[in-house]
Amino acid sequence: MKQVEKLVENLQAELEGKRVIELACGSGVFSAAAAKYAEAVFCVDLDESRLNKTVGSLNNVSFLRCDATKLPFPNGSFDLAVLYNSFFHVKEVWPQIFQESRRVLKDGGNLLIISSWKLDKEIMKTVLRNVENMDGYAFSRL
């Protein structure tokens, strides 16, 4: 079992039957794994060149090329937003991404910031208040 699949299995209760958006998805490996449990997963990124080809073959996963600071979704569209192994890449626009993710989340929705990547972990500890360790990942719930 891949590391991301084990992580998603641990998050099953948070994903089950939910509408999920993965911001700055990169290859989309989190989205592909989350599709097993989620009702629908939307993965967004500025660049689709790194996107794993299997993402497009999943019925409940959609990729959208867009800026995570200006999402084209109505308020309250998602139950869960996720940044997976991408915090380092978005650190300069983090306040705008945070604000935009809160806008598209339903009341009571969560933003999960998760990383196994060393650069992400260091920046997360500096920028975020509540960073925990979970199975080798840095993990924050906002």
Image (tube, rainbow, N blue to C red):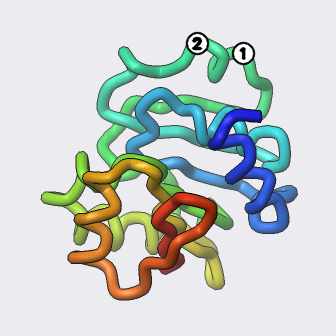
All told, the count of numbered labels is 2
Residue at x 85%, y 58% (from the top left corner) = 16
Locate residue 41: give its quadrant: top right
Query: Which element is circle 1 on?
Result: helix
Residue located at (48% from left, 50% from top): 84
Q: Secondary structure at mark 2?
A: helix
Q: Is residue 42 left or right of residue 102?
A: right
> Residue 72, can we see it?
no
Disc 2 crowd, CA 10 A, few/some/many (<14, 14-19, 20+): few
Dot 2 amino acid type: Lys
Residue 119 locus on image (x, y percent)? 26, 52
The amino acid type of the residue labelled 1 equals Ser
Examine the image and state in which quarter residue 103 appears. bottom left
Q: Residue at x 23, y 71 (%)?
A: 95
In the visual, does 128 lie left or right of 5?
left
The one of 45 and 70 positioned closer to us in this rendering: 45
Q: Are marks 1 and 2 in contact (CB under 8 Å)?
A: yes
The residue positioned 58% from the left and 12% from the top of the image is: 53
Q: Residues within 10 Å of mark 1 (few under 14, many from 20)?
A: few
What residue did someone put label 2 on?
Answer: 53
Instruction: State whether residue 33 appears in this view.
Output: yes
Give coordinates of residue 58: x percent, y percent: 75, 23
Decide: is 112 above or below 71. below
- Distance between the alpha carbons at the discs numbered 1 and 2: 7 Å
* Residue tagged 1: 57
Quarter of the figure with the N terminus:
top right
Image height of 18 relative to 108, above or below: above
The residue nearer to you, when weighing 15 against 3, is 3
- Does 139 appear above or below 50? below
* Percent coordinates x, y for residue 36 in the rendering: 83, 40
Q: Closest to the observer: 78 or 133?
A: 133
